[in-house]
Amino acid sequence: DAKTTQPNSMESNEEEPVHLPCNHSTISGTDYIHWYRQLPSQGPEYVIHGLTSNVNNRMASLAIAEDRKSSTLILHRATLRDAAVYYCILRDSQGGSEKLVFGKGTKLTVNP
Amino acid sequence: GAGVSQTPSNKVTEKGKYVELRCDPISGHTALYWYRQSLGQGPEFLIYFQGTGAADDSGLPNDRFFAVRPEGSVSTLKIQRTERGDSAVYLCASSSDTSSYNEQFFGPGTRLTVL
């Protein structure tokens, strides 16, 4: 599985936007970019995914670089409930294993 | 609707004992996954079921670990001769199909402590 690189931690203030970066320089043409987050003492939860185009949903936006070697998860207005570990994961659309390969993720702290 | 549930939420056992961890996936989900998570690390894949069969068990660390899903719904992860290094949170997830973009829904996990 292609690897991703994320900062260990980031900090934000409540109601401000947060940009969480992810580098995936070895991404293949068939890899989707997925983001999951894990709130304290809970299992991970899906946030968003994309292939080439930027994506928006009720939780966040995903901005994908034109060369697809990096992406950014955008939380438009951080709340205290957004404090979590955010994982950037590549999944091959051509099949094979369906497992998610998690790195250490980025621990986001939101200050009131 | 009900999400993925896991029982027990906490399990404390002694080294050398046998444990079973249960996962109830979302109704109708054909795919079921087990992961384990050590402190400060991301979840690590163990095994994946499609229906009743294990489609990928490449993450099971050794033959002390075994999982079953006899009727294609509930799954049990079984650990024999537990060791202190098995202490972790064991997470279960399910999804409705195996397309690359289909999200996995995770349960709250079972925290296993081996003394």
Image: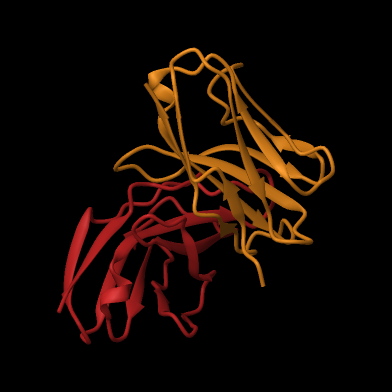
Chain colours: A red, B orange
Q: Residue shown at 43%/50% (left/top)?
A: A26
Q: Residue shown at 61%/16% (left/top)?
A: B63
The quadrant holding residue B40 is: top left
Task: Give the vertical position of B20 relative to A52 (above or below).
Answer: above
Count of residue discs:
0
Q: Residue shown at 41%/80% (left/top)?
A: A60
Image location (x, y in percent) of residue A64: 42, 73
Q: Quadrant of the C terminus of chain B?
A: top left
Image location (x, y in percent) of residue B95: 68, 58
Image location (x, y in percent) of residue A77: 28, 86
Most foreground residue, A100 or B66: B66
The quadrant holding residue B103 is: bottom right
Residue A67 relative to residue B5: left or right:
left
Most foreground residue, A68 or B6: B6
Task: Give the vertical position of A69 relative to A53 (above or below).
Answer: above
The quadrant holding residue B15 is: top left
Residue A5 relative to residue A100: left or right:
left
Q: Residue shown at 58%/17% (left/top)?
A: B80
Q: Quadrant of the N terminus of chain B?
A: bottom right
Image location (x, y in percent) of residue A6: 29, 55
Q: Of all residues shown, which one is farthest toward the right?
A: B71
